[in-house]
Amino acid sequence: MTAAPGWSFIDAAFAIDLHDRLVARTGGASGLRDENGLLSALDRAVNRAHYGEPDAAELAACYLYGVSATIPSSTATSARPRR
Protein backbone atom coordinates (compact mmCIF):
# COMPACT_ATOMS: atom_id res chain seq x y z
CA MET A 1 0.00 0.00 0.00
CA THR A 2 1.36 3.42 -0.89
CA ALA A 3 1.55 6.13 1.74
CA ALA A 4 -1.30 8.60 2.03
CA PRO A 5 -0.53 12.20 1.07
CA GLY A 6 0.36 14.49 3.96
CA TRP A 7 1.44 11.77 6.40
CA SER A 8 4.67 9.94 7.17
CA PHE A 9 4.33 6.41 8.48
CA ILE A 10 6.43 4.07 10.58
CA ASP A 11 8.02 1.28 8.55
CA ALA A 12 8.99 -2.17 9.82
CA ALA A 13 12.73 -1.41 9.95
CA PHE A 14 12.14 1.62 12.17
CA ALA A 15 9.76 -0.31 14.46
CA ILE A 16 12.24 -3.16 14.87
CA ASP A 17 15.10 -0.72 15.56
CA LEU A 18 12.99 1.12 18.14
CA HIS A 19 12.06 -2.16 19.84
CA ASP A 20 15.70 -3.28 19.94
CA ARG A 21 16.74 0.03 21.51
CA LEU A 22 14.01 -0.24 24.16
CA VAL A 23 15.00 -3.82 24.96
CA ALA A 24 18.67 -2.79 25.28
CA ARG A 25 17.70 -0.03 27.69
CA THR A 26 15.03 -1.77 29.77
CA GLY A 27 15.62 -5.50 29.30
CA GLY A 28 13.48 -8.19 27.74
CA ALA A 29 13.63 -10.52 24.79
CA SER A 30 14.79 -9.04 21.52
CA GLY A 31 13.65 -10.20 18.14
CA LEU A 32 10.56 -10.44 16.06
CA ARG A 33 8.05 -13.21 16.68
CA ASP A 34 5.65 -12.47 13.84
CA GLU A 35 6.77 -10.33 10.89
CA ASN A 36 3.36 -10.47 9.20
CA GLY A 37 1.73 -9.37 12.46
CA LEU A 38 4.04 -6.35 12.59
CA LEU A 39 3.34 -5.44 8.97
CA SER A 40 -0.39 -5.79 9.56
CA ALA A 41 -0.21 -3.61 12.68
CA LEU A 42 1.73 -0.89 10.85
CA ASP A 43 -0.63 -0.96 7.86
CA ARG A 44 -3.64 -0.10 10.04
CA ALA A 45 -2.64 3.56 10.19
CA VAL A 46 -1.88 3.72 6.47
CA ASN A 47 -5.25 2.14 5.69
CA ARG A 48 -7.06 4.61 7.97
CA ALA A 49 -5.37 7.55 6.26
CA HIS A 50 -6.38 6.27 2.81
CA TYR A 51 -10.03 5.77 3.69
CA GLY A 52 -10.74 8.72 5.96
CA GLU A 53 -9.47 12.02 7.26
CA PRO A 54 -7.82 11.05 10.55
CA ASP A 55 -5.86 13.30 12.86
CA ALA A 56 -2.55 12.32 14.44
CA ALA A 57 -4.25 10.91 17.57
CA GLU A 58 -6.42 8.57 15.49
CA LEU A 59 -3.40 7.29 13.56
CA ALA A 60 -1.50 6.78 16.83
CA ALA A 61 -4.48 4.80 18.13
CA CYS A 62 -4.34 2.62 15.00
CA TYR A 63 -0.69 1.82 15.72
CA LEU A 64 -1.37 1.14 19.39
CA TYR A 65 -4.31 -1.15 18.71
CA GLY A 66 -2.52 -2.95 15.87
CA VAL A 67 0.59 -3.71 17.91
CA SER A 68 -1.33 -4.67 21.05
CA ALA A 69 -3.65 -6.97 19.10
CA THR A 70 -0.91 -8.80 17.19
CA ILE A 71 2.02 -8.56 19.66
CA PRO A 72 4.63 -9.17 16.95
CA SER A 73 7.71 -8.95 19.19
CA SER A 74 9.28 -11.69 21.28
CA THR A 75 9.16 -9.53 24.42
CA ALA A 76 5.48 -9.85 25.25
CA THR A 77 4.49 -13.31 24.08
CA SER A 78 3.50 -14.43 27.59
CA ALA A 79 1.33 -11.34 28.09
CA ARG A 80 -0.83 -11.93 25.03
CA PRO A 81 -4.50 -11.47 25.87
CA ARG A 82 -6.76 -14.51 25.69
CA ARG A 83 -9.43 -14.51 22.98
Image (tube, grey):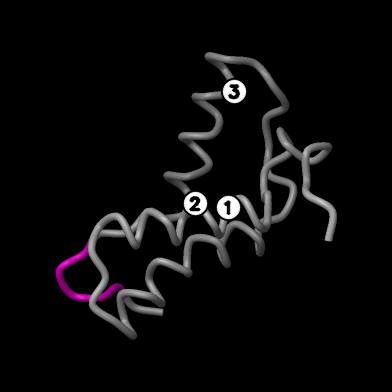
Q: Which residue is mark 1?
A: 67
Q: Which residue is mark 2?
A: 64
The quarter of the picture where residue 60 lies is bottom left
Depth check, front residue: 2 or 47: 47
Q: Position of residue 62 (x, y in %)?
A: 45, 61
In the displayed structure, 40 sits above or below 20; it is below
Q: Where are the magenta residues, as a range?
A: 3-7
- Report, in whole angstroms, how far the alpha carbon at label 3 lies from the one at label 2: 18 Å
Q: Amino acid at mark 1?
A: Val
Image quadrant where one finds the C terminus:
bottom right
Image quadrant where one finds the N terminus:
bottom left
Sequence-wise, the earlier of marks 3 and 2 is 3
Q: Residue at x 68, y 49 (%)?
A: 71
Q: Residue at x 23, y 63 (%)?
A: 55
**Marks 3,1: beta carbons within 8 A:** no
Q: Amino acid at mark 2?
A: Leu
